[in-house]
Image (cartoon, helix red, strand yellow):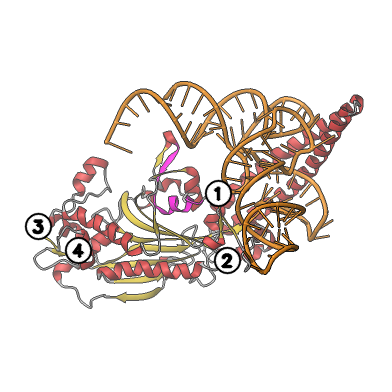
Amino acid sequence: MIDQRLLRTDLDAVTAALSRRHRPAIIDDVRHAARLDERLLAIARERDDIRARINLLSKEVGSLRRDGRVDDAEALQTESRELGASEKALAGEHEEVSAALDELLLGIPNMPHPDAPDGASDDDNPVVIGPIGLLNEYPEHQRVPHWEAADELGILDNERAAKISGAMFTMQRGAGATLARALCQYGLDLNADAHEEVRVPSLVSTATLTATGQLPKFADDAYAIERDDLWASPTAEAPLTSVYAQETLDDTELPIRLMAYSASFRREAGSAGRDTRGMLRSHEFDKVEMMAYTTSEQAPDLLDDMVARAEMAIAGLGLPYRVIEICTGDMGQSHHRTYDVEVYAPGADAWLEVSSVSWLGAYQARRAGIRVKRHDEDGKPVKGTEFAHTLNGSALAVPRVWAAIVENFRNEDGSVTVPEVLHPYMRGLTVIRSE
RNA sequence: GGAACGGUGGCAGAGCGGACGAAUGCACCCGCCUUGAAAGCGGACGAGGUUCACGCCUCCGGGGGUUCGAAUCCCCCCCGUUCCGCCA
């Protein structure tokens, strides 16, 4: 959620920042929200005045009754009753406006960071690192898409996955399954130096998905378990962000850094028919996610660190990659500043997004009610609180990395060489061969 | 799934229609005392909204109701603990 107070004090700053997302409808919503906010404030003031009067009268009634002056008390009670009626009307109006405002606010995206590159679409995302490790020319045996290569090796069985669950589900077998799990293990071990490992729930509440921004606007993208009012988590970002929802954190304990391996479930409603083969896009995939709670000052350094970690995970595997920065027109709703790591897959001849690292500013923290208590240099708590900053990013998204390994490390005989860093997790297997 | 009991400030825990944003203890903070510390003494000590400010409003798990007035009474929901049942 954007800062409601900023809406009041500097509407122009908000519209200027959000106009960089190149979607005029957002600006209309912002102006509308500002008007509703103003109205809400006026109603609230009027209502508070009435309530103050009622409170005063009630106290007076109490003391009159103690003194046995029943008639005087009853006169005040009558006045209070009348005030109560008009207060009720205002309260109704307040609730109405408040609900309308909330609905608008929940749909208004985050303001991009001033340094985020301007652009209208993903075509405008600048490459900021790399490409690194990209060959000038790829031999024929690496120009085989992973779904064919994997099929040959018997390590991917999406046909039977479809039998079990339907289209767009994947199933790895044998060394393919081991490789998928090895990547998770690798992703976790690589980041254990700075993160606490958390095993989060896979089913999450509506409040949890609202906090990170998937709801209410993108409900169609998530699996709903309506009977129990739960959702299948589309990313560990959601549960990890709500670990400290509705809590006030001490600035002295920040940053708090968490990581989690989890399955991620996505309906892919808007991308039906795209990337239907192999491991590029599916309804369920595994991922290791990083998460940080910080002060506003700490956030930029954490962003750099997390991007570097996502980058090092890919570099460590020896895969060709690049890092792009997401431009203002391509950013996700909650994002303030975002970098993607993309790996090159020669068989599919495509750059695959394997990590997205984002700084959310206070946007999610405001929705989740995550506050920070500051302390001055003497360690004394400073009056009041502010919203925390959150960051998250994939340390390693399994399926596309899996695909990139199969394509990049495919040998002439069709076998696939396992990257050395994964050897500890592969039960001695260093080359995947057809059985 | 059934039953019982609970949910109050950082924690523990009282309050069960009016002087309660909330006793008391612990923790934390500031003084005094002390060479220093402990103990002791005195003081301060939740959050949000609004206001230039004084102040005013809201918050005792969530929502609704009764009342001039609700932490306190009534209804619904959620969560927790214990016991029973079932179970990886």
Q: CA distance from mark 1 to mark 4?
A: 42 Å
Q: Amino acid at mark 1?
A: Gln
Q: Secondary structure at mark 1?
A: loop
Q: Quadrant of the image for the C terminus of chain A?
A: bottom left
| Nearer to the camera, B8 or A117 | B8
How many C-alpha atoms fall within 10 Å of the one at disc 1: few (<14), some, or many (≥20)? some
Q: Is residue A234 magenta?
A: yes
In the picture provided, is A283 more to the left or to the right than A68?
A: left
Q: Which residues are magenta?
A: A229-244
- Judged by depth in the image, the label closer to the viewer, 2 or 4, is 4
Asked whether residue A17 is in view, the answer is: yes
The residue to which callout 3 is attached is A434
Chain bearing mark 1? A
Chain bearing mark 3? A
The residue to which callout 2 is attached is A17
Q: Earlier in the sequence, mark 1 or mark 3?
A: 1
Q: Earlier in the sequence, mark 2 or mark 3?
A: 2
Q: Amino acid at mark 4?
A: His
Chain bearing mark 2? A
The residue to which callout 4 is attached is A423
Q: Residue at x 74, y 35 (%)?
A: A88
Q: Which mark is residue A246?
A: 1
